[in-house]
Amino acid sequence: MSDLLRIEREGHVTTLTLDRPDTMNPLGAAGDGDEFAAACDAINADMGVRCVILTGAGRAFSAGGDIKAMKEKTGNFGGTAPEIADGYRNNIHKVLRALYGLRVPLIAAVNGPAIGLGCDLACLADMRLASDKAKFGVTFLKLGIIPGDGGTWILPRIIGEARAAELFYTGDLIDAPTAVNWGLVSRVVEAEALMDEARALAEKVAAMPPHALRQAKTLMRQGRGTSYDTALEMAANAQALMHSTADHAEGVDALIEKRPPRFTGA
């Protein structure tokens, strides 16, 4: 197991912190994929977790892949071409698949630079908040490589083809105000307030019924690649299940009684 993640649980919210601050939280060390997979599997198995925050320790969210390892041709970046490809599949991509596979809403609290793979990680979140010190970039071509972490699939879906192409083909960085203008993040806050804002948002999400939360996220994900008719059919089936839950009855009673609902996951 690697030393990448610091995991903290408070109530229904789990915070995952990329914890290599001295080197700007790079990824790609042996075991990073396994550590992320184990953390996300545990979250998915625990109905008590209703929201996750992902952030970085120190001054960066994540600088992306380990440049020193690239230079020295070690770890994921050493060996033959097939071996390097397997390194991506079995480690770096395992990190990305684990985050993408989270069944609960994910908030990225982008505290500083999110570059390359770091930007891809942030893009996998359902909601993104940025500190005023955050910067975003997908600078792979500047290193003579291509975006190898799925960013070409997800970034155009967030900010559109033209703006994504501009970032990929120039390697330019954008600041937090530009990121919010382009729709990459929801809002920008002062660095000192970022985690308080993220936790407040997470607590609001975590107050929702856990089964309905997970179903809503599933429907949003499935809706990316289905027809409207298929989306309606999936919604009908999921809705029928939700109508049979105690949380649905609690939501109706709370509305009628004009009080906050108390959802338990039943």
Image (cartoon, grey):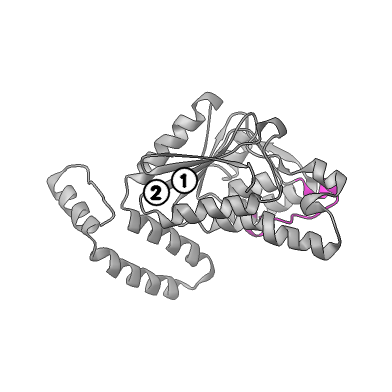
Q: Name the residue that disc number 2 marks.
A: 49
Residue 99 in view in this figure = no
Magenta residues (range): 139-155
Q: Which mark is residue 52?
A: 1
Q: In front here: 171 or 100?
A: 100
Q: Horizontally, is 181 left or right of 252 in the view?
A: right
- The location of residue 87, given as percent across then percent down, is 74, 58
C-alpha gap between disc 1 and disc 2: 8 Å
Single out the mark in the foreground, 1 or 2: 2
Residue sitting at x 42%, y 47%: 51
Q: Amino acid at mark 1?
A: Val
Task: Write down the quadrant of residue 183 in the picture.
Answer: top right
Q: Which mark is residue 253?
A: none
Q: Horizontally, is 72 left or right of 32 in the view?
A: right
Q: In front here: 14 or 243?
A: 14
Task: Write down the quadrant of residue 81 in the picture.
Answer: bottom right
Q: Is residue 17 depicted above or below 229 in this figure?
A: above
Residue sitting at x 45%, y 71%: 228
- The location of residue 36, given as percent across then percent down, is 58, 51
Q: Amino acid at mark 2?
A: Val
- The location of residue 99, given as percent across then percent down, is 55, 53
Residue 60 in view in this figure = yes
Q: Is residue 234 depicted above or below 25 in this figure?
A: below
- The location of residue 12, given as percent across then percent down, is 37, 44
Q: In front here: 105 or 223?
A: 105
Residue sitting at x 41%, y 41%: 202
Q: Crowding at label 2, few (<14), some or many (≥20) Cα neighbours within 10 Å?
A: many
Q: Horizontally, is 99 left or right of 69 in the view?
A: left
**Residue 166 colored magenta?**
no
Quarter of the image with the C terminus is bottom left
- The reply to whether discs 1 and 2 touch (Cβ–Cβ < 8 Å) is yes
